[in-house]
Amino acid sequence: MAPKEPLSFLETTFRSIYPQDFDFRQQAENRLKQLTMPLWAMGDLMDLAVDLAGMTGSLQPPVSRKKVVVMVGDHGVAAEGVSQYPAEVTTQMVHNIARGGAAISVLADKAGADVLVVDIGGRDDFTELAEAGKILSKKIGRGTANMSYGPAMTRTHAVMAVEAGIEVAQSLADEVDIFATGEMGIGNTTPSTAIAAVFTGKKVSDLTGRGTGLDDAGLKHKIAVIEKALARNTPNAKEGLDVLAKVGGFEIGGIAGLILGAASRRKPVVVDGFISAAGAMIACSLEPFVRDYIICAHRSAEPGHLALLEKLQQRPLLDLNLRLGEGTGAALAMPLVDGAAALLTDMATFAEAGVAQA
């Protein structure tokens, strides 16, 4: 009998991902039903508490050590004028995050979360930031190719992007209780909309938003660019890596990998907005059980985000009309995760408190 070929890194990761622990879900649900309040009075937070128990396999789910991972990638399609901002703003904003001046910097700090910036596919180098320990380099390429003329990247590079995200999650897993996804990449609502169109089957015109603030003419042009990219590349919805390679982005692949890697270590992942949801969609297409470890932070103002959330069967914790990205929505949702865990671990039951039940 011929020897078996060794499993790939991706396949090994997939085989490490299991559904939530049903027994701990049941124990958590039983305890929550006995808390000193009307039955399930804290609604979605109690559902989240059950999820946390199932994800972590514990009635004391650890959530104190938080890490927002901001994946960085530039996009060739930005040359088509699909964003209000020029491509060099990606680099400028990476430096802003590293200095602590960005929205994600201040919101993560308030949530008690650390921020890690990972260069997956930025156009420029960040040598000084890397040497100062303010950015982790996992660079695969200097931005994607222009997907309106051909694939955004090779399949090999798509695999490398996902693997890089897995490596980040697994290298941090021993020191992080809960991950959050973030991103920085001018033009990235365009590939995210393309990904949403592929997986949901909805019309591009129904999914495309204004991104950084396009006017009506800019929105119409953005729709045409996405439609052209999909027609030229014909991504296969049954092949997540094919979709990522043809109309995705390096940071989207990195987000997918981060989610996969976190799930392989039974770590919850708070998924931010539209671009992060596109990464989550890629991750779930590769290994469906990864859905059990996703906490959807919020519903953004981008129409494609709602379509992806419905496809992923996820209910957002917040709806604040956000459209920034960076991981900001995930940072805002972190205190809700803390609250859900606290209900399970700190609140008294009727018996413990000596309170009569109805």
Image (cartoon, grey):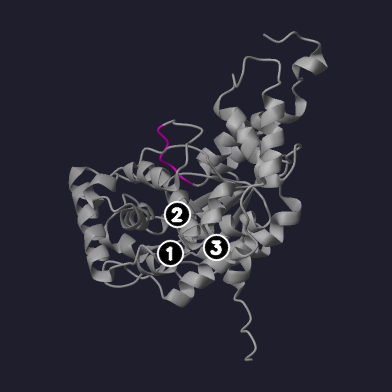
Secondary structure character of the magenta stretch overall: loop
Asked whether the residues under the numbered discs 1 and 2 touch, taking CB atoms below 8 Å apart as contact, a structural biologist would say: yes
Distance from label 3 to label 2 (Cα)?
21 Å
Against 89, is 125 above or below?
below
Q: Which residue is mark 1?
A: 240
Label disc, if present, on residue 119 of the rendered structure: 3
Q: Which residues are magenta?
A: 321-325
Secondary structure of the residue carrying tag 1 is helix
Residue linked to disc 2? 281
Which amino acid type is shown beneath numbered disc 3? Asp
Rounded to the nearest angstrom, the CA distance separating label 1 from label 3 is 22 Å
Identified by mark 2, the residue type is Met
What residue lies at 47% left-to-right and 41% top-to-bottom? 314
Percent position of residue 148, x then y: 27, 66
Q: Is residue 331 above or below residue 181?
A: above
Residue 263 spot, x, y in % from top left = 62, 54
Mark yes or no: residue 112 visible: no
> What residue lies at 56% left-to-right and 35% top-to-bottom?
333
Residue drawn at (64%, 61%), measured in percent from left and top? 168
